[in-house]
Image: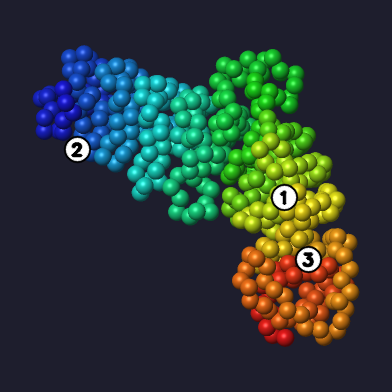
Amino acid sequence: MDNQRPGARIPGPTVLLLVAQLQYSKAVDALHERPQDPLYEEYNGDTALHIMCRRPSLSVRVADAILAVDPTMAGRPNQQGFTPLHFACANLSCINSIDRPDWENLVLKLITACPCAVTRQLPRNLQSKTPFHLACAANASASVLTAMLTVSPTLATQPLLQVSETSTAGYPLFLLWHAVKSSDDWSKMELLLRAATGAPIITNHQRQQHSNTNSSNSDHDTDGPDEHFDVLNAACRTNPCPRDYLSLLLQRFPNRASWTDREGLLPLHHVILNARKNGKDGTEKFLIQRLVQLYPTGASCPFTHRYPPLLPLQYLISDSEANWPEYGISELVDAYPEALRIPDPRTGLVPALASAPFAIHSRLHLTATYKLLLKSPEVFETWSRNKRCGCQWKLQKPSFGSSNSIPVNLNRLLARIDIVQHTFCSEVTYLVLFAVMQAMLDDVASY
């Protein structure tokens, strides 16, 4: 029978009406007589399955009978876009602990009946929520999250429609982290990290087997049977990730700061790779500081695999789109000072010079360049002409700017930025000082 609106219902108490009245036993009996009743809709598009999933009580028998008629009912949206799976997942947050297993069993039945319902999004005015977002916010069981991620691993990194681009509250990792209640729930975070990084998603049965086998080794209590997966490395690789959770991992597994993944990358490498994607909450700076503190040698380990063979300091500085002055540049330099004297293999420039073209972006960039200059004055050759008092020089703009020349009193400019005691070779002065001047044009104009 085709789907119909209320006016075309069969007279008498239908399954939809009986479910609305919580008369579940009669509803099961009615289904045998009226097998097409579950297809009927209320005025707002709700079916009998919608109504049951949004009520505080449920009947697994009714759900089984309805899904036997048409499994796709689990993913059928009403006029607002809600599916029965949406309602069932949302209900998990308000169901008591006694009834919760039954509700989670219902959610699993709905997923099995109609897997595509897992990725069904609500309209934009409802933040494009999927059942997975609702399940994370309700601290659903690992079984429910595993079933959903098995259908679509990309859900682990799919955010809600945000009001602000810098907000992270709508990401599944944040929704789940804010909902977890004890250390027993931390393994659920690992499930999302596995999906986010492309690692195999393990089942509860596999996890239990691994736990029994390695019960004497506490360092394997969250990683599961995949020996190549490291939860700290995955958390640093996944952006964004809750800072409190990252801090917890660093406390629990400090030795893993030296562990590499399949590509030979350290957690420090992944933090730097994510630099341009960050918000402005200081998470990357915090991570660089802690990771370098736990494993100082990491600052001297170049990138591997498909990335240029750069040191962490070189890679961070070479990314002009990242807010690198706000990160742990000082920590990287302190951990491996020799990096200041190692030129970038692509450009031949040491870090102080490689950062100079970007000093025009902001005063933070200028400050970073200035600090790198102060930490490595010996990399420059003596330029005797900069001691000629009052001499006017014309510095030509390098190729990344226009060709206009800017007259400036070189000695007064050097004194202004407090590096007059250092000397420079003529070839690098044009590059470094032009970048400095661009960021300080107002000050230079006042002379």
Please state if 216 lies on the left or on the right of 15 as rendered.
right
Front one among 102 and 267: 267
Front one among 255 and 431: 431
Residue occupying image coordinates x 65% and y 66%: 399
Quadrant for residue 56, please give it: top left
Residue carrying label 3: 428
Percent across and percent down for residue 78 are 27, 36
Q: Earlier in the sequence, mark 2 or mark 1?
A: 2
Label 1 sits on a secondary structure element that is loop
Please state if 389 lies on the left or on the right of 83 as rendered.
right
Residue occupying image coordinates x 69% and y 73%: 396
Residue carrying label 2: 43
Q: Is residue 333 visible?
A: no
Amino acid at pointer 3: Val
Percent across and percent down for residue 339 are 82, 51
Q: Nearer the viewer, mark 2 or mark 1?
A: 1
Residue carrying label 1: 346
